[in-house]
Image: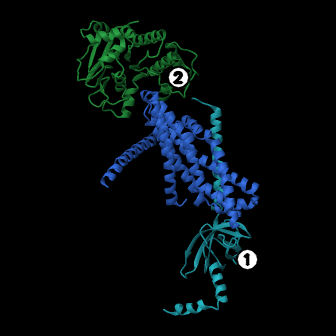
Amino acid sequence: MAYGSRAVLRGVSCAFPPGTISVVLGGSGSGKSTILKLVGGLLRAQAGQVVVGGRDITSLSESQLYGVRRRLGMMFQNGALLDSLSVLENLSFPLREHSRLTRDQIKTRVHERLAAVGLEDVDDLMPRELSGGMVKRVALARALMQDPEILLVDEPFSGLDPLSTKLIEALLVRINRTRGMTMIVVSHHIPSTMRMAGHVVLLLPGSVVQGDPAALRSSEDARVRRFLTEDTDASEQILAHTHEFEAGEHAPVRRGGA
Amino acid sequence: MNASPTRDFFVGLFVLAGLLALAYMSFSIGNLQYKGTGGLQVFATFDQIAGLKPKAPVEIAGVKVGQVIGISLDDTYRARVDLDLDKDLQLPIDSSAAIVTAGLLGDRYIQLTPGAEETFLQPGEQIAYTESALVMERLIGKFLVNVDDKPEEKADKPAAHDP
Amino acid sequence: MLRLLRRLGRPLGKVIEQLGRIAAFTGHILAVTVHPPLRLREFVDEVFKAGVLSILIICVSGMAVGMVLGLQGYNTLVRFGAENSLGAVVGLSLIREMGPVLTALLTTGRAGSAVTAEIGAMKATEQLDGLRMMAVDPIDYVIRPKAWAMVVAMPLLSALFIVAGIAGGYLVGVVLMGIDSGTFLSSLENAVDFDDDVAGSILKSVIFGTLVGLISTYRGYSATPTSAGVSAATTSTVVLASVSVLIFDYFITALWRV
């Protein structure tokens, strides 16, 4: 598994197959975002290991991590755009830092990426002037600027209207299909998850249930079915305590959805 | 990127204004310039320098021409004062140096009185004629002694001859 | 007695731990400073924020302090018939103490708090994590220009404060109280020495700039990433920077006699 990653969280083990959209589901406080931060090296695992692309990153120094992160792209929940820079500068930023492209080449690439997420004429806008949906799309474009092998997406649908949700979902699916990019999406939006995920990791208190959406829907576990049908509120009651659990190795399953 | 010419202009202006203020502090108020224009180093010996300090100004007719750069005791127990004067100052060899006080209680400085000779002092040479500082306490003391029928002089003499 | 020691020991240990962290933080800033890129663009922007935007408050305060010094000095000196030394009193007070210290205190309130708040807000909105995910060290990109800008801006601001203060003293002494202009200026020029007074003044303001720059960036960087955390960090910057400026002022004065 060249690009496969494997995150271990509170005695919980899960694998994200390469080239697939994996969605991490779970109630708030279940550690969904923590998984992304562990994969990105933003947080350090206190025990166990985090393997990204066949390399254990838990023992790497911060400067070694920068090497790993160049192969990762991350779309933050609230965009995390640098608010002192315009959209163009925000998108140019990673390339100005890490490539030798000229200003014009960078600008061309920025416009390509913006077009890919359905935006144009936003170069000179500041992040605070963008709507919620636009922020997410600009953040997605920025995460893609360096053609990452793995895209980490934190709550792409939070705070969005249904239309924008569909748009972002379609974008993620298209990028996954056209580039075969490995994606780890953290979400609690059940319908879109069921449509787009090729692999679902459901974080329950102290346990992890993994599988493709169809398999989860027909799961024997009552908690899983309830989570998938009743949305997050119901799951809050389940999230009471944690205990040690080890999930087995999982075979990658591909599936697109729209 | 994020280039803003007005902002850069103001930053430039700020740095310029700040440097000017620093320069005013250093050169105009802090008298830094006398460090650079020296070059003619001579010395003079005095019996008494009474509170003359390094960096005290050296003046001719009230114009500052240099400063004191060192004070030490020579072999004959006189005070040797090294002066750093303006390089192109032509000082006749029979010039004299006096330690004077600015005002009644002011700082001490050196006053040079140019002589009449045709040859000039070269670096490292000595100003031969000097006039020591007047010590205010001694003057007052002398004045008091004269008035009080010299009782302290009597007390002084045996003490001085004792050993 | 033992209990007292123990009670003192705990905060003392915390202080030492904090000092260690600040030292590591400082080392990190120095380490990224010697590495390219230069980040001149960001540095100039920070000098604008810390320096240019503080000019007005510095000049107005300097003028006011100079005028008060002129008035108080005149009223005191005139009793001894020494009002001709007003220039020396105003100049020496401003250059040796008032200029560097008051500038540092004002800049802490005006710019240091803003630095902490900005970095804290960037942390709370995941912009610092965003930078790390783009393989850019936030200490390099965000902290370094801000800290250095403070070091550079402080002596310049302090010099402006002093010149404005001398102008204020001149205004009161010469224009209002009728001291001869030449007397005022020559008293000023004779009393102030570069080595004894001006160099010490510049040394002080550079040290204060370093203190304020380090404390304000460190407090922002280590802030709890919430609104309350950022607000607490901002308060702590103002308190800590002001107190340490005053403490350092005493020791610099005692050790170097400036």
Whole-Å distance between the Cαs marked 2 and 1?
A: 78 Å
**Is mark 2 in CB contact (under 8 Å) with mark 1?**
no
Of residue B73 and residue C91, the one placed in the foreground of this image is C91
Q: Amino acid at mark 2?
A: Ile
Q: Where on the picture, by quarter, is residue A229?
A: top left
Q: Residue A16, can we see it?
A: no
Of residue C143 and residue C164, the one placed in the foreground of this image is C164
Q: Regarding mark 2 in the picture, which secondary structure is present there?
A: helix
Q: Amino acid at mark 1?
A: Gly
Task: Provide residue C204's location: percent of width, then percent of height.
Answer: 54, 52
User: Chain coloured blue: which letter?
Assistant: C
Packing grade of label 2 (10 A; few <14, some 14-19, many >=20) is: many
Q: Where on the picture, by quarter, is residue B86?
A: bottom right
Task: Provide residue B140's location: percent of width, then percent of height.
Answer: 65, 82
- The residue sitting at 69% across, 54% down in the picture is C169
Q: Are marks 2 and 1 on the same chain?
A: no
Determine which residue is flagged by label 2. Answer: A106
Task: Provide residue B46's location: percent of width, then percent of height.
Answer: 61, 79
User: Chain coloured green: which letter?
Assistant: A
Left or right of C164 in this view: A66: left
- C46 lies above or below C162: above
Color theme of the render: by chain
Chain on which label 2 sits: A
- The residue sitting at 69% across, 73% down in the picture is B104
Task: Provide residue A242's location: percent of width, then percent of height.
Answer: 26, 23
Of residue A111 and residue C194, the one placed in the foreground of this image is C194
Determine which residue is flagged by label 1. Answer: B115
Q: Where on the picture, by quarter, is residue A251?
A: top left
